[in-house]
Image (spheres, rainbow, N blue to C red):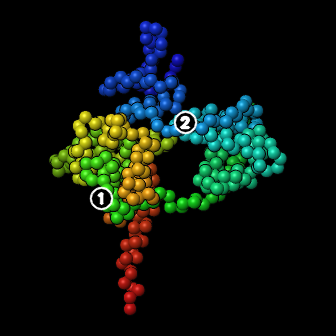
């Protein structure tokens, strides 16, 4: 067995069975027990890289991936096969799985264009913008899923225009999805942004010292995504010496979100007083701050479900964990944070997202300043 992964070593026990270990200087050796090549193995490896415990996702059984069969050169199914084999293989396991399922759906569509041949068996070079629009519209009842179809088709053809096939020519000469418009989302504003009244209502229901209150405090005073809150722990804390000679407790974490995790800059942030007080109540034996009732770290999905329960208990069925992050951005912008500051605080790679919040805050301040002009 050969694994081209950093810090991975393989040895054999006395019975000849191969054992896989993660070995990094300055850290204890970790045995990786999941099946090599599986989604769980790559998740376990990523956890080892980040220095956090691996916890199997408690999600329900995955849907079966439809069999694509052996692709014929030149068909849409063939292009999908090449793209998945040569490009998507380097992406996160969950991303690969999602794309496999979406492409399998598309390959089986027959009510597209003329004839009833499945899309997967048609020549991809003949695919038109109209065909892509029909593929999108087939999923119109779920706009986000429909737009995702367009996105992955566009990404695949964009890749094909830069890479060669067996004839040493570029796999594609055009991108039929390049100019296909997105459908309007059912909820254009995304997750509901918590109001200060809703935060107070949650706090009234869940007192200081409860796990729910600790979760809210971490979300509220770090601005982290749920994927990072699930692993947030003592390994992310450190003390920094300030220019005036005083020391400050801070946290540093690399945000993890899909395939862009490697490119994301670290979030380096001071531990604010409300958070420091909440963390002081966590047992010193807990490396990860939020643990399940069985004493194990939450999976991302598990923490999301738990937040759903806590919000429901507080009479906030429309609120979610991500809405707290949005509230953090709104509060920060209205308190005068600049786009650059928001970008650093929330780990965004550009100021595009930050600008939405600062411009909204500016409009609110400007309207407030001009409101008296309505009076006679």
Residue pictured at 47% horizontal, 15% vertical: 18
On the image, the x and y values in percent for residue 374 come to 41, 86
Q: Quadrant of residue 157?
A: top right
Task: List the residue tagged with mark 2.
Answer: 61
Q: In which quadrant is the C terminus drawn?
A: bottom left
Residue pictured at 74% horizontal, 54% vertical: 130
On the image, the x and y values in percent for residue 251 come to 30, 44
Q: Please identify the residue farthest to the top as the structure is shown.
A: 14
Residue pictured at 20% horizontal, 49% vertical: 243
- For marks 2 and 1, give the CA distance: 37 Å
On the image, the x and y values in percent for residue 318 come to 45, 59
Sequence order check, earlier mark of 2 and 1: 2
Task: List the residue tagged with mark 1.
Answer: 204
Left or right of residue 347, residue 113 in this image: right
Callout count: 2
Q: Please tell me whether residue 322 is drawn above or below residue 11 in the rendered image.
A: below
Left or right of residue 159, residue 130 in this image: right
Q: Residues at badges 2 and 1 in contact (C-beta under 8 Å)?
A: no
Residue pictured at 77% horizontal, 45% vertical: 110
Q: Please identify the residue farthest to the bottom as the structure is shown.
A: 376
């Amino acid at each position: 067995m050969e694994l081209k992964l950093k810090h991975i070593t393989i040895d054999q026990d006395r019975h000849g069975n191969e054992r896989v270990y993660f070995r990094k200087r300055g850290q204890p050796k970790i045995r990786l027990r999941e099946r090599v090549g599986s989604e769980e193995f790559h998740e376990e490896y990523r956890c080892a890289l980040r220095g956090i415990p691996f916890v199997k996702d408690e999600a329900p059984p995955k849907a079966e991936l439809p069999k694509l069969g052996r692709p014929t050169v030149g068909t849409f199914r063939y292009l999908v096969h090449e793209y998945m084999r040569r490009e998507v293989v380097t992406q996160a396991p969950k991303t690969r799985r999602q794309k496999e399922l979406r492409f399998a759906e598309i390959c089986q569509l027959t009510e597209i264009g003329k004839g009833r041949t499945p899309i997967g068996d048609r020549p991809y070079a003949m695919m038109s913008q109209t065909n892509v629009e029909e593929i999108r519209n087939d999923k119109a009842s779920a706009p986000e899923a429909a737009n995702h179809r367009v996105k992955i088709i566009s990404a695949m053809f964009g890749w094909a225009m830069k890479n060669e096939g067996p004839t040493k020519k570029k796999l594609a000469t055009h991108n039929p999805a390049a100019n296909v418009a997105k459908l309007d989302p059912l909820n254009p504003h995304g997750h509901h942004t918590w109001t200060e009244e809703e935060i107070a209502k949650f706090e009234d229901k869940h007192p200081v010292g409860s796990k729910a209150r600790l979760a809210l405090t971490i979300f509220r005073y770090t601005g982290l995504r749920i994927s990072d809150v699930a692993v947030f722990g003592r390994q992310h804390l450190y003390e920094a010496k300030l220019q005036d000679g005083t020391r400050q407790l801070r946290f540093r974490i690399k945000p993890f979100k899909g395939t862009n995790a490697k490119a994301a800059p670290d979030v380096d942030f001071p531990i604010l007083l409300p958070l420091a007080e909440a963390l002081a109540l966590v047992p010193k034996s807990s490396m990860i701050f939020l643990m399940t009732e069985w004493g194990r770290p939450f999976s991302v999905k598990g923490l999301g479900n738990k937040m759903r329960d806590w919000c429901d208990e507080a009479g906030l069925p429309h609120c979610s964990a991500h809405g707290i992050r949005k509230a953090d951005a709104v509060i920060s912008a209205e308190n005068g944070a600049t786009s650059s500051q928001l970008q650093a605080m929330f780990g965004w790679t550009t100021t595009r997202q930050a600008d939405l919040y600062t411009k909204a805050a500016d409009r609110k301040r400007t309207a407030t300043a001009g409101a008296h002009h309505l009076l006679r």
